[in-house]
Image (cartoon, grey):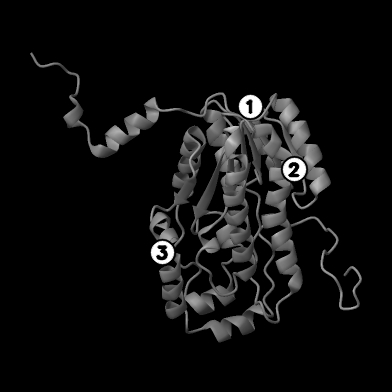
Amino acid sequence: MKSARSSPDQHSAGDRKAMRWLRGPGVRGRKVLITGAARGIGAALARQLHARGAAVALLGIEPDLLAEVARDCGEAPWRYCDIGDPAQVERVVDMLVAELGGLDVVIANAGVAKQLPLLGGDPRVMEETLAVNTLGVYYTLRAAGPHVLHGNGYVLIVSSLAAAVNLPLAGAYSASKAGVEALGNTLRHEIRHTGAKVGIAYFAELDTDMTTRGFGTAAARAILGRSTVSGTAPLGPAIDGIERAIARRKRQVVSPWWVAVALPMRSIAQRLIDFALRGGVATALEIARTEDPPFTTDQPRRPRRVQSEAGGAA
């Protein structure tokens, strides 16, 4: 009688890969701090990591949503935090790390998006986008980074395919994400000697508010003929990818899969985008100068950081 046990060659390559993943290092017991945890990537990641046995701490600017995510994560610690306020970030991160009893992983995920014509658009869109997406990541790294400088430490910075391939009206967002890509690559060198590692996540248009509220506008449709460039990808594979990245302290996370092909060919991809989007841009710019969609998440009011023409604070 044949044994009921399957032989290795009866498994598909996908099955074998899945089994290797199950046998590999997991996230159980990891202490993880997540910014922008009230919705989208941050909320989905928090719930999944909690289900896998990690201890999570959450921060963001939407208390009701944060509290709901925290309940789903076994009453995880959470705090309101304006990521663009360095003093507040430092204070809140220290509180949450104390409640976790240490820190293994920081996920710098918080971000906003809003279209901006670079000429004739509202400069406050650029300022706010950089304040949250770039300076906010820097403030997070500055506050949380010292806690993960150990042999099991890991930093994951959520950048975007927009850091590599730039679209009309997305200049503020692309600049901010290119900035955090540079921060991640620099930090990797600066902390390597401690044993800690740094990863960067590059996502295309995922099924989140960032995609639908940030760039699903009349101006974007005038350029593309639809709301997205590549189509909206499901969120699940991106969350699975982040989980694997945490477990293995990976250098890079992508979703969908084809982003891994586009990144090393970014100059070619940019040329293709330039060619494909030649029509409709002038019309889109006219629409965008009067269309005023909200930021993907309503932001706290904070002082403007630019200088006026007279040389004083604006």
Q: Secondary structure at mark 1?
A: loop
Residue 13, percent from left and from top: 25, 38
**Local crowd at mark 1 within 10 Å, few (<14), some, or many (≥20)?**
few
Q: Which residue is mark 3?
A: 265
Residue 109, percent from left and from top: 62, 48
228 or 270: nearer the eye? 270
State which tag comes first along the sequence, 3 or 2.
2
User: Can you say whether 69 is above or below 82 in the image?
Assistant: above
User: Can you say whether 200 is above or below 161 in the image?
Assistant: above
State which tag comes first along the sequence, 1 or 3.
1
Residue 84's label in the rendered image is none
Residue 202 visible, this orientation: yes
Q: Which residue is mark 1?
A: 74
User: Can you say whether 149 is above or below 173 in the image?
Assistant: above
Residue 61, percent from left and from top: 74, 47
In the image, is 311 to the left or to the right of 137? right
Q: Amino acid at mark 1?
A: Gly
Q: Which residue is mark 2?
A: 63
In the image, is 162 to the left or to the right of 90? left
**Local crowd at mark 2 within 10 Å, few (<14), some, or many (≥20)?**
some
Asked whether the beta carbons under mark 2 and mark 1 sit within 8 Å of each other, the answer is no
Quarter the C terminus occupies = bottom right
Q: Secondary structure at mark 2?
A: helix
Residue 71, percent from left and from top: 66, 31
Quarter the N terminus occupies = top left
Q: Secondary structure at mark 3?
A: helix
> Splitting the image into 4 quarters, where does residue 269 fall?
bottom left
Q: Amino acid at mark 2?
A: Pro
